[in-house]
Amino acid sequence: MILYFADKTFTVRETAGTNIRKEYIVKNDLKEQDIDTGIATFTFDLYYDFDKRQGAEDLTEPGNFVFRQRGEEAECYVIIDTEEDTGKGYINVYAEDADLDLVNEINVEYSAESAMPIASYIEYFATDTGWEIGVNEISNLSRKLSWDGEQTTAARIRSVATQFGAEIGYSFVIDGLSVVHKYINIYKQRGNTNIELRVGRDVKPITIKRSVANLVTALRVKGGASSEEDSESKAITLSGYNYDDGDIYVSGELLVSRSALRKWSRYNRETGLSGNVGHIVGRYSYDTTSQSELCAHAVTKLKSLYDMETTYEAELYTIPDELGIGDTVSITEPDGSLYLTARVLKLSVSETNDSKNVAKLGDISDD
């Protein structure tokens, strides 16, 4: 692995790699992606000879950039934090692929005058950041949305995507050693399908955890303002908001699930069950004064709580080059029989330490 270090003008100043003949050596690298945020993080230790300490500090100055090429994928990260151990001669670097224009800049309240497509919202919030719309798989959809609180640009973009039922990813086009395009990509659902992983060959024995400790069939939902002084005056609920997807719907201030009620109600042995009798009601709050945004986040939350929670964690011997965040994988037993089908919700990849290669799986289908 070779890393290219660039200053704030994207001018490459130096390279480093895992080869011990390099002046700067990379160890303990870890790339992590989470389907919820869409942001990839990259951490590593940069080791230096003691006479190269100043050079290492200059290269890893927060705000500088790190490039690398992994297969056909070009990666670009902005350095956010560093921590140096001068005794052992290395600098730990934490970087993100969404740069400071997205993760630090604040967007204020905004209300659309009419329904707009998702690209119009994102282009508005990402104005003057250098980011463009890349892939857009839902260009035919429009929504009328509003926000009363403040959010970073990255958080606001995630909020837009959530309310459109979409997922966000970031990518780059690098020509030579220059970043020529930075793309915000909009997906119906990230990832590919039909990637097979075999227990014993690709995957170590899988850890399975099951729990009903947090199970609820309904949520009492509340929103609020970003500032503490306005939180009470701008507190909202879902009362009066219309939402019904056939299973989950709004009932007064509650967001409830028909299927969860049938399965988990303490009255599930009785006939003639009607209304909201027997719901297990939890609480959920989200920092927004938009009912549409509040409902979108609450629906996602209820779906994560309305049945037994089953978590699969698969530690991988190696990460197949084609495996990415959001992919649907089929995990098979050594004899070829299907064990489960799941989606990669979080992916941790290291080129220097195979024990860090971990995929967290969700949307499980047992067979």
Image (cartoon, rainbow, N blue to C red):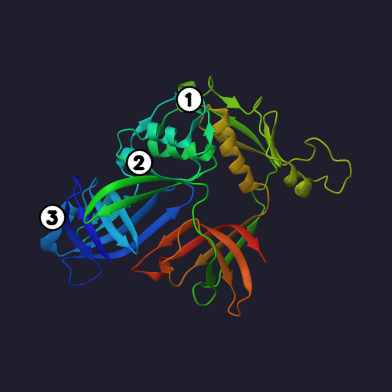
| Alpha carbon separation for disc pair 3 and 1 | 50 Å
Q: Nearer the viewer, mark 3 or mark 1?
A: 1
Q: What mark, if any, has residue 54 been given in the picture? A: 3
Q: Is residue 55 above or below residue 131?
A: below
**Which amino acid, by three-letter code, is at mark 2?**
Glu
Image quadrant where residue 351 sits:
bottom left
Q: What mark, if any, has residue 48 been given in the picture? A: none
Q: What mark, if any, has residue 112 been given in the picture? A: 1
Q: Residues within 10 Å of mark 2 (few under 14, many from 20)?
A: some
Looking at the picture, how far across and down is residue 162, in whole percent? Answer: 52, 40
- Which label's residue is closer to the chain start, 1 or 2? 1
**Which amino acid, by three-letter code, is at mark 3?**
Gln
Looking at the picture, how far across and down is residue 344, in whole percent? Answer: 51, 58
Q: Nearer the viewer, mark 3 or mark 2?
A: 2
Looking at the picture, how far across and down is residue 301, in whole percent? Answer: 59, 43
Quadrant of the image containing the N terminus: bottom left
- Which label's residue is closer to the chain start, 3 or 1? 3
* 260, 326: nearer the viewer: 326
In-image side of 108 versus 254 (left or right):
left
Q: Residues within 10 Å of mark 3 (few under 14, many from 20)?
A: few
| Alpha carbon separation for disc pair 3 and 2 | 36 Å
